[in-house]
Amino acid sequence: MTGFDPALDLTLTRLIRAPRKTVWSAWVQPSLLERWWLPAPAVARVDRLEARPGGAFVTRMSEDGAGFVPHLDACFLAVEEYERIVFTNAVDSTWRPAVPAPVAMTAEITFADHADGTEYHVVVRHGEAAARATHERLGFADGWGSVTGQLARLAESM
């Protein structure tokens, strides 16, 4: 991890009352990721989830569960089993620069053991303050907070 810059980065931390391996599984198994990846009532569909450095991370979304539209076309930069996932949407799943990237970002998710489960920490990095401000204005806290809550509920029920 390269540190946190409050002028460029957004962050979220949550205690998930489930074992780290369970939280990890919810991230790397497509059928589980689909259950929490988008704020309800939106529905996610995973097209590609290759949890390895350079692997594709492609999802679609639907507001009604019928018609799906593109949501995320990204690639994984780092994957350290049970510890860390890093992905970016600045480069798409075919390693081409994303044109245009909605809000270009790199997200780093870390998983750490905690006496009560898993400490789940997210840092979303942006290249400029304006991109950070746009992401915040578009609802970073509500969106990432909501899906993290959904992730927690899923992992805690497994």
Image (tube, rainbow, N blue to C red):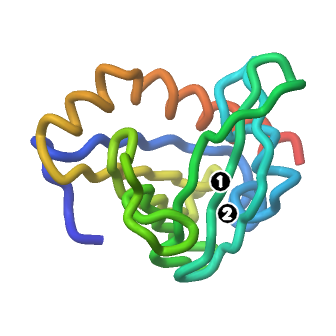
User: What amino acid is labelled 2 in the image?
Assistant: Arg
In the picture provided, is 80 more to the left or to the right than 68? left
Residue 147 drawn at (x, y percent): 62, 33
Q: Residue at x 33, y 49 (%)?
A: 104
Residue 33 drawn at (x, y percent): 76, 50
Secondary element at image label 2? helix
* 94 is higher (above) or lower (below) than 153: below
Residue 150 drawn at (x, y percent): 70, 32
In the picture provided, is 12 more to the left or to the right than 45? left
Tell me, for residue 20, which label it has, or none. 2
Check disc 1: other Cα within 10 Å, few if <14, some if 14-19, many if 20+: some
User: What amino acid is labelled 1 in the image?
Assistant: Gly
* 66 is higher (above) or lower (below) than 51: above
Q: Residue at x 57, y 64 (%)?
A: 113
Q: Disc 1 designates what residue?
A: 117
Residue sitting at the far front: 99
Residues at marks 1 and 2 touching, judged by CB atoms closer than 8 Å: yes
Of residue 106 and residue 112, the one placed in the foreground of this image is 106
* 141 is higher (above) or lower (below) than 72: above
Q: Between disc 1 and disc 2, whose residue precedes?
A: 2
